[in-house]
Amino acid sequence: MARATNTAENIAVPNDLQAFWMPFTANRSFKARPRMVARAKDMHYFTPEGRAIIDASAGLWCANAGHNRDSVVAAIQKQAAELDFAPTFQFGHPRAFELASRIAALAPGDLDNVFFCNSGSEAADTAMKIALAYFVAKGQGTRTRFIGRERGYHGVGFGGMSVGGLPNNRKAFGPMLPGVDHLPHTYNREQQAFSKGEPEWGAHLADDLERLVGLHGDTTIAGVIVEPMAGSTAVLPSPQGYLKRLRQICDKYGILLIFDEVITGFGRLGHAFAAERYGVIPDMITFAKGITSGSVPMGGVIARKGIHDAFMHGPEHVVEFFHGYTYSAHPLACAAGLATLDVYRDEKLFERTKAIEPKWYDAVMSLKGLPRVLDIRCVGLTCGIDLASKPDAVGKLGFEAMDRGFHEEGIMFRAVGDSLAFSPPLIVSEDQIDEIVGKVGKIIKALA
């Protein structure tokens, strides 16, 4: 299609869907039968025609405080009128420092220093670069390897893809970074099916890190990166004691432990960060999504004081860490983040999530026994439901469920192959939980 010029006769009309190459989307199918939203408020999206769609996925795991919260909208508008952009390379603006202090205060232990970026993908790559540079600063430059985990997701940068363990995200893009290995994933349906919260079976799977250390040598490994709850693979909670065991092994060999909390951060598991839920202090936490409730792109890495301080040597006029992004700590994102943290605090949404967990668990587990339901997993305010695939069309049922949900039942959720993933905003009411589960039950029963 030729590039249009700005004249009255060739301006593209709003229903021309061809120019936008959509991410992680079956483009041809979408454009034949679009699932379009035009506005949002609190727990709902609304189609261009005004039909309400209950949001059972917090957008993309990110609208934790709900959509278009008045105070967040006002903060963004006010900031746009005051300071639209300011560089954070050699300059600064007050809200960046204020937000970093607020985030550090929420993080456990001595996770005291925040490096801002714009997404979870950038956060994962940033954490990996911090780890590599940290060991160079410590005189341990042989530590260049990273250990990820099967079925893990750490974004779409080359670093995050390399440590990630989702085959479809990797197979088209070549050999990835060298020197990366993977722990086994933590899921065993026979041992863990229909678990509420963290499954009892599986802590021993962390011991495979000992094998990888033996294979590669402890002086070659810089970091281990895992999600406390693997979300993008349709909700795999960490087994009881698993993360503590990883911490022990990393301490034993001087390896940095990185928690990817892009999904679990900011209340999703009933705490500011999942690290607090599990009583484990990692060396770095990556975050994004919930920091602004999805309103403005933002991400970052929280590092322990010792990691940050290892860089603070040499002449004071010299850059200590040659990394960053044009939009790191963008003023609008900082304003949105501060206002969002106020909502979490004032409405006690983290505490509310923890209190509503039992209701959520009981509700989603009521779907057990429906046709094709193989397993249901839930932790915090998340849920994954595995459906038995059609032998000749793996992934078709999940797609049909998502599409039927939007068009026929007025609900939005994620489909991951033939698994369904749910993560409603933390403001969800008990009645809305029942509504979500009721709609999902109807959808599953209607699948061919």
Image (cartoon, helix red, strand yellow):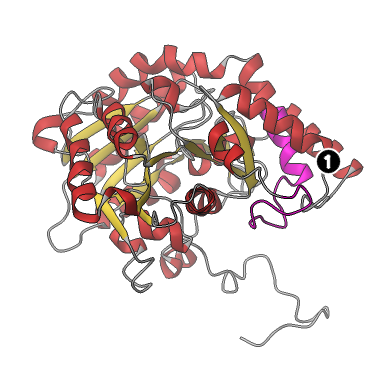
Which secondary structure type mostly characterizes the magenta part of the structure?
loop
Q: Position of residue 418 (x, y in %)?
A: 25, 50
Q: Quadrant of the N terminus?
A: bottom right
111 left or right, relative to 277: right
The quarter holding residue 196 reads top left
| Depth check, front residue: 342 or 126 | 126
Determine whether 357 is above or below 214 in the image. above
Write down the region rendered in magenta: 315-340
Q: Position of residue 250 (x, y in %)?
A: 32, 37
445 left or right, relative to 305: left
- For badge 1, the amino acid type reads His
Few, some or many residues within 10 Å of mark 1 (<14, 14–19, 20+): some
The residue pinned by badge 1 equals 93
Farthest-out residue, left? 190
| Depth check, front residue: 132 or 164 | 132
| Depth check, front residue: 199 or 360 | 199
